Image (spheres, grey):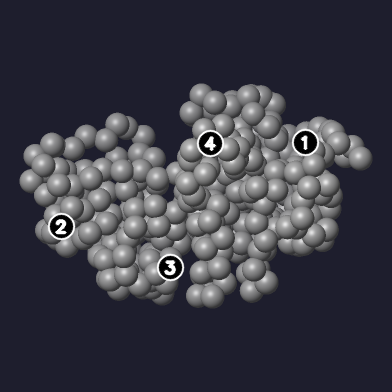
Amino acid sequence: MDRIVSGYGAKKANSKLLPQSYEIKKIAPKEVVVEISHCGICYSDIHLIDNDWGISNYPFIPGHEIVGFVTQKGSQVKNLKIGQRVGIGWFSKVCEKCTYCKTDRDNMCASPEMTAVGRNGGFADYIKADKSVVYPIPEKLKSEHAAPLMCAGWTVHGAYRGYKVKPKDRVAVIGIGGLGHLAVQYGKAMGYHVTAVTSSSSKKTEAKKFGANVVVDYKNLSKLKNKFDFILVTAHADLDWTSLANTLDVDGNICFVGIPPSPISIHAFSLIMKRIKISGNPGGSRKMMKEMLKIAAEKNIKPIVEQFKFSDVNKAIKKVKENKIRYRAVLSRSI
């Protein structure tokens, strides 16, 4: 049956979100409709609202850190039940046919659908998605904690797994924010020696609570030569990349999951002498997503969240933009 969806969407770049509705037509055999209970606010949603990446189509409803309950399913959906609690992340569909999908690299799918790009996302009461990217949420995870994991958790865990970081490897997490505080927790859970790097004195104690073995002020980072095997950059800031590269040991890797505003500049000599790699990662495969949720449930990994009513979405976005959220904003129907 058709369904009218109500949410909060952007009508143009850099605008406040306003009430918006659209109609979900009859679902396809492999699709499900999810009634949304929680949706995290990722900074990628803000980039899409403001069209920072030049890929936004207006009007649209943002939101891609979704948790809710299956209310409808197509005739070919056998792995999910009506009423089951599930999550949806950045993708609302992958093709399952391309080389990448067939080799457990479906996060690199050649023809995916993104949840809030060219379609409507999760700042709403319902959403439709393909069964290929709808994930059961483990019972131990609260919905307000599971929502940010659908992107933030997926992003940092996917970087570790994508680059095959091994137990006991020396990992530095640059920036202890929405991504970074989860990167520290996953790093500890996966057996790494984790150094948290932050310029915020108020976050140093918290970083230790998240599981960091060592906490370093960014201004002192240049003193650490050859100390790390893997550096995960979660910060959205321009830094001294050559100095950062010098903290890596031979065959080390700087991996970007945060997006600095300027092009990355680094002296080639720093790369050549220690065979250093500069990389990025767009999250994990479907297999990794399931593993990420399983680890969160088993190791009690959870984001620190501030919850808002869906109707307060603009207030929440303002706090995210002002960097006043510790550490993830979540829209919730339970408050």
Which of the two discs, 1 and 4, sits closer to the camera? 4
Residue depicted at x 80% and y 60%: 81
From the top left corner, tell me how far across and down residue 293 is, in percent: 56, 64
Local SS, label 3: helix
Q: Residues within 10 Å of mark 2 (few under 14, many from 20)?
A: some
Residue depicted at x 56% and y 32%: 111
Can you tell which mark lies on residue 19? 1
Q: Which residue is mark 3?
A: 185
Q: Which residue is mark 2?
A: 249
User: Looking at the figure, which quarter contains the N terminus?
Assistant: top right
**Pointer 1 or 4: first along the chain:** 1
Q: Which residue is mark 4?
A: 98
Give the residue type at disc 2: Asp
Which of the two discs, 1 and 3, sits closer to the camera? 3
**Pointer 2 or 3: first along the chain:** 3
- Cα distance between the residues tagged 1 and 3: 36 Å
Give the residue type at disc 3: Gln
